[in-house]
Amino acid sequence: MKAAFFTATGPPDVIEYGDLPTPEPKAGEVRVKVLAAGLNPIDVSIRAGKVPAALPFPFITGTDLAGVVESVGPGATRFKVGDRVWASNQGLLGRQGTFAEFCCPHEDYVYPMPLGASDLEMAALALVGITAHLGLFYRVNLVAGETVFVNGGTGGVGSTVVQMAKATGAKVICTVGTVEKAEVARGFGADTVINYATDDVTAAVLDATGGKGVDVYFETQPPSDFEAIVARTAPFGRVVVMAGRAARPVFPNGPFYIKGLSLYGFAMFNVSPDLQRKSADAINAWVHANELRPLIGKVFPLSEAAAAHRLQDDNTVGKAGTLMGKVVVLPGS
């Protein structure tokens, strides 16, 4: 099969495109013909060697997929040949990734395709959708009527948080960096959009909330200014962090505890398959109801996987600002 893989960690150029043996599904696994595969910041960190991991070289990159079940391994019972599915949690913890014509995920990380959804959409939604849902509902139990702040409303996770919060009946405030991104965020339902390049974000948040601050602060970026986070969050509010493993920001302990705030962190791949399946069920329902859709920034053929990584790298690490949404690769092209 054709695959995008690397035999040593390093810059995007370590990625090769070529032939590898087609995998056979082991116990509990299904072999999926991959029709679309999603790229995430964690993938570039693993490829760069920034995340300590015992990688089985040659290692196939990519976390998410959408496609069709081609064969079923021993003991796998959730799916049958011909089922359309999507999956996440691949390319992690020693599991081979999704940038290939075939992938063998364990059925615990595979979900049925919602009616009417495309492979491109679900590959783009997989990791970011599960991450957004876990943060909003598993960690901070968002309810209708609350106000959510999303730092980065047009990123992969951020745009998904905006839509899920709106579907739940929350008010949403988010930041963007350009006028174009502001229009996209409003199209996803954001009630207040703040341009961090031109506006005083804290003043705008307080103005939008009548001076109270937000109930839930969802930080999609490596946190760098907890003073600002505390200032923007309402008394007894909840703060979610899910990025920036190397970040070591100064923490304003006094203002934080006097306000009665709570801080919640999580990494999606450390959450149990059962909880992730609940997130997938919610995602499928929202997609079917046309209340959730992905923001896709760029689509590449599998043969250009290195270029896909380079674009993600430039924006995740280099903060180039040239990517709005998710990168998706098509193995069949």
Image (cartoon, rainbow, N blue to C red):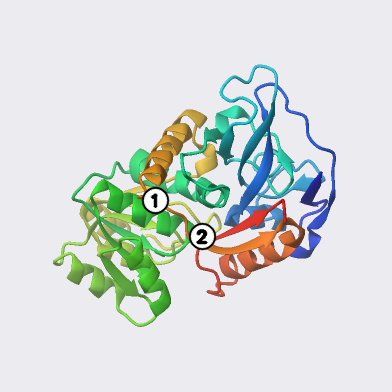
- Count of numbered tags: 2
State the residue at coordinates (55%, 74%). Answer: 322
Question: Visible in this render: residue 177?
Answer: no
Front-lying residue, 291 or 243: 291
At label 2, counting other C-alpha atoms closer than 10 Å, the crowd grade (few under 14, some 14-19, many 20 or more) is: few
- Name the residue furthest top: 75
Q: Amino acid at mark 1?
A: Leu
Helix, strand or loop at mark 1 = loop
Residue 316, percent from left and from top: 57, 65
Residue 112, percent from left and from top: 52, 34
At label 1, counting other C-alpha atoms closer than 10 Å, the crowd grade (few under 14, some 14-19, many 20 or more) is: many
Point out the image quarter for the C terminus: bottom right
Helix, strand or loop at mark 2 = loop
Front-lying residue, 105 or 296: 296
Front-lying residue, 57 or 32: 32
Which is more N-terminal, label 2 or label 1? 2
The Cα atoms of the two marked residues, 1 and 2, are separated by 31 Å
Image disc number at residue 292: 1
Q: Amino acid at mark 2?
A: Ala
Quarter occupied by residue 304: bottom right
Residue 226, percent from left and from top: 36, 63
Pointer 2: what residue?
A: 247
* Left or right, residue 20 beside residue 284: right
* Left or right, residue 60 beside residue 93: right
> Is 195 situated above or below 132?
below
* Left or right, residue 161 beside residue 114: left
Question: Visible in this render: residue 184?
Answer: yes
* Left or right, residue 117 beside residue 9: left
